Image (cartoon, helix red, strand yellow):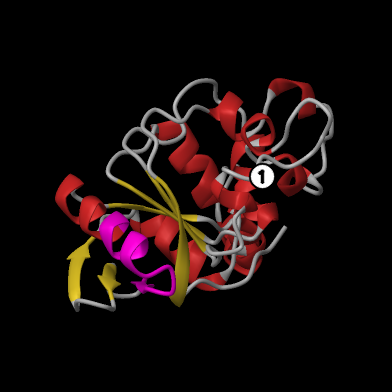
Amino acid sequence: MAYDKFTVLESTAVPLPIENVDTDQIIPARFLKATERKGFGDNLFRDWRYNSDDSPKKEFVLNNPTYSGKILVGGKNFGSGSSREHAAWAVYDYGFRCVVSSFFADIFKNNCLNIGVLPVQVSPEFLDEIFKAIEADPNATLTVDLPNQKISLNTTGTSESFEINDYKKGNMLNGFDDIDYLMNMGETISEFAENTPL
C-alpha cells in the first residue's frame, strides 16, 4: 500500500513529554483484532484519552484543542515494549506523519518507516527546547526536511540533523512501502531473471 510522499513537513506539534511510552499504551492489546490499517487512530492512547465510560479525559493532550498538528513530540524511549505494528498504524491513522523523540525502540521505529511515519531522533537538549517552545506557544511550528535530514524549530531557528537509513529514506520520498519498492523494480527483476541462467 503506497503512502503520501514525505519531503518537507512544516506543522505545529502535539507535546507528550512522557518517557518510556510503550506500544500497549499507544494501542492497547484489546484493539489488535483488525488486520486492515484502518480505524486504529480512534484508539490511539485509548486508556489515556478516555474514561471507562468512554468520556474524554480533559487533561490528556489529544483532548486539548490548544494542541494540534501532524507532528507528535514524545519523551525518551518512545515505542518500547511489544513489536505490534498496530502502534505505528494508530499513529498514522490518527493523522501524525512524524514522531520526534530523543530515543526510539528499534522495532517501533522500523514499523513507522514501513508505513509513512517519519521517526526523528534528536538530542535530549533539543527535545527539551522543543517542549519548552510548544509550552510557551502552542502555535510554534517545526519544519522536518527529509531530503536534507534536518529538523528545525521555527520560533528560534535552531535545528539538528537526524539519521535515517538510505533505503527507508528513498521509500518515504517516493511514498513506497516495501511491496511498492519491489513492484517499481518489476522490469529490472524480469530482465535479471531472463538473463540469468538456471
In this image, 161 relative to 73: left or right? Answer: left
Is residue 176 placed above or below 157 in the rendered structure?
Answer: above
Tell whether position 147 is magenta: no
Tell me the kind of residue under disc 1: Ala
Residue 136, image quadrant? bottom left
Residue lying at 27% horizontally and 58% vertically, measured from the top left: 132
Image location of residue 96, percent across then percent down: 57, 59
Residue lying at 54% horizontally and 61% vertically, measured from the top left: 97
Q: Nearer the viewer, residue 78 or 163?
A: 78
Tell whether position 133 is magenta: yes
Image location of residue 57, percent across then percent down: 67, 39
> Circle 1 is placed at which residue position?
90
Residue lying at 47% horizontally and 74% vertically, measured from the top left: 11
Instruction: Give the residues drawn in magenta, as a range.
Output: 131-145
Residue 131, image quadrant? bottom left
In this image, 18 relative to 161: left or right? Answer: right
Q: Nearer the viewer, residue 87 or 62?
A: 62
Count up the numbered dots: 1
**Rendered-image quadrant of the N terminus:** bottom right
Image location of residue 114, percent across then percent down: 56, 49
How crowded is the residue under tag 1: few (<14 C-alpha within 10 Å), some, or many (20+)?
many
Residue lying at 79% horizontally and 39% vertically, measured from the top left: 55
Image location of residue 2, percent across then percent down: 68, 63
Q: Which residue is most to the front?
A: 58
Q: Nearer the viewer, residue 45 or 110?
A: 45
In this image, 112 relative to 125: left or right? Answer: right
